[in-house]
Amino acid sequence: MTTPENPFEALMKMGEGWTKELGPVMEAFEKMVPTMPKEAMEAFMGKGASPDGLDAKTRLLLTLQGLIFQGALLESQIRLTFRHLKEADASDQEITEAIALAGLFAGAPAMTKALQLFTAMQGEKT
């Protein structure tokens, strides 16, 4: 007698395969997307959009955590978020702490992948 496949597990495998297939397309897209200036981010995503709400840097840190919670599969989007966080004056310490905190909920593999991507980005800058 065969054990039926878990539908959730099958869905997750299908999503991972689709994400991997999209990887090269997203990497090309990543190179085409310019980094938004800090002032524009603040105007459209931060205090300009919601004066009593979160600033753009905090929203980007939350975006980073959301991408990590999804398993850190979307490498291009994570790199774009890192790039915009640096433009928003986020320190390496703030980014690393956001990644580490996400690891508490997303697990060590997702946290490790995000840290590897961030370390690689830092290596490219030097």
Image (cartoon, rainbow, N blue to C red):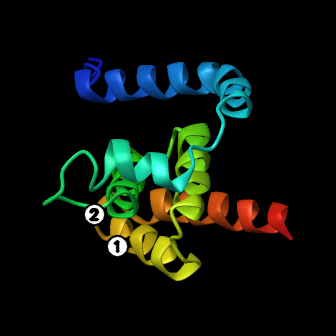
Left or right: residue 21 compared with residue 45: right
Q: Element under label 1?
A: helix
* 16 to 59, vertically: above or below: above
Q: Residue at x 63, y 63 (%)?
A: 118
Q: Which residue is mark 2?
A: 105
Position in image of residue 44 (x %, y %): 35, 41
* 58 to 79, vertically: above or below: below
Picture quarter with the C terminus: bottom right
Q: What amino acid does circle 1 point to?
A: Leu
Q: What amino acid does circle 2 point to?
A: Phe
Picture quarter with the N terminus: top left
Q: CA distance from mark 1 to mark 2?
A: 7 Å
Q: Are marks 1 and 2 in contact (CB under 8 Å)?
A: yes
Q: Which residue is mark 1?
A: 101
Q: Residue at x 41, y 47 (%)?
A: 67
Q: Residues within 10 Å of mark 2 (few under 14, many from 20)?
A: few
